[in-house]
Image (cartoon, grey):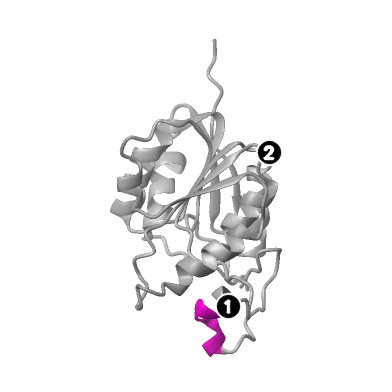
Amino acid sequence: MSARLTLRAEDLGPGPGVHPLLRHPVFAWLGLRPSMGQHTVGEHNALKKWATGRSRLVEIGVAEGASAVGLREVMSASGTLWLIDPFHLSRVRYINAMKRAAHRVVASCRNGRAVWIERFSFDAVKGWDSPIDFLFLDGDHSEEGVQKDWDSWHRFVVPGGVVVFHDAAVFPGGWPQPDWGPVKLVDKLFRKQALPGWRIAQQVDSLVVVERLEQRA
């Protein structure tokens, strides 16, 4: 049975045997455990595959930063990774352990440049004018929320660039359900119809990668 694996920034994390108390992000911030990601090993590897050598990357929904540091490790040395997350769910806002854990793990990799945008994605996109070659949508999973992220951000993705949806496919032993926002959006845009100029490039567990096709002369 596939399951959401606890991922270390480097690869695998402490796994399901971690004491429940240690799952609080304060322990990642303090360096007492690796950052945990809510994706499988296969998904983690696919993210790194599609991010390799990219120069202009955006991740929406950072959490503890396990996927973000993976992207930073493989992106172009001259590239920029924009990390968008309001970190608004902390019960103790002046500590905000998840935010601190994410900053800590992303800073552990010095490749390229990481730019933090502590805002909701629908606010961060206002005034945005930079082209994107890798866009990871892992923020608001409601149907309305993921639709808004797609509508707001995909126009900045250059031909040959990709948009990666997390929790966007039902797979054997997995957790997403058919009524989840990312699943419904991917089905609507890329399975029930062929959205012009885009194609599904890969699916790994719940991760769906869609590629913007090169424009024909």
**Nearer to me, 176 or 109:** 109
Residue at 60%, 64% (x, y): give it: 105
> Can I make out residue 1 in this image?
yes
| In the depicted structure, whether residue 33 falls above or below residue 217 | below
Horizontal side of 158 relative to 112 (left or right) equals left
According to the picture, the residue beneath numbered tag 1 turns out to be 30
> Residue 43, can we see it?
no
Name the image quarter holding the C terminus.
top right
User: Within 10 angstroms of label 1, few (less than 14), some, or many (20 or more) residues?
Assistant: few
Query: Total number of numbered labels?
Result: 2
Q: Residue at x 56, y 41 (%)?
A: 80
Q: Determine whether, in the image, residue 171 is placed left or right of residue 143.
A: right
Image location of residue 136, percent across then percent down: 50, 48
Q: Earlier in the sequence, mark 1 or mark 2?
A: 1
**Of the numbered discs in the image, which one, if any, rests on residue 86?**
none
| Residue 205, image x, y percentages | 59, 59
Disc 2, SS: loop
Is 11 placed left or right of 96 in the picture? right
Q: CA distance from mark 1 to mark 2?
A: 31 Å
Q: Give the camera-side residue of 102 and 6.
A: 102
| Magenta span | 20-27
Task: Give SS at disc 1.
Answer: loop
Name the residue tied to disc 2.
Answer: 53
Q: Is residue 62 above or below residue 74?
A: below
Mark 2 surroundings within 10 Å by alpha-carbon count, few (fewer than 14), some (14 through 19), many (20 or more): some
* Residue 67 belongs to the span the image colors magenta: no
The quadrant of the image that shows the N terminus is bottom right
Q: Looking at numbered disc 1 in the image, what kind of residue is underneath it?
A: Leu
Task: Give percent across and percent down for residue 79.
Answer: 61, 38
Residue 199 x %, y %: 53, 35
Judging depth in this view, the residue of 124 and 50 nearest the camera is: 124
| Identity, as a three-letter code, of the amino acid under mark 2 | Gly
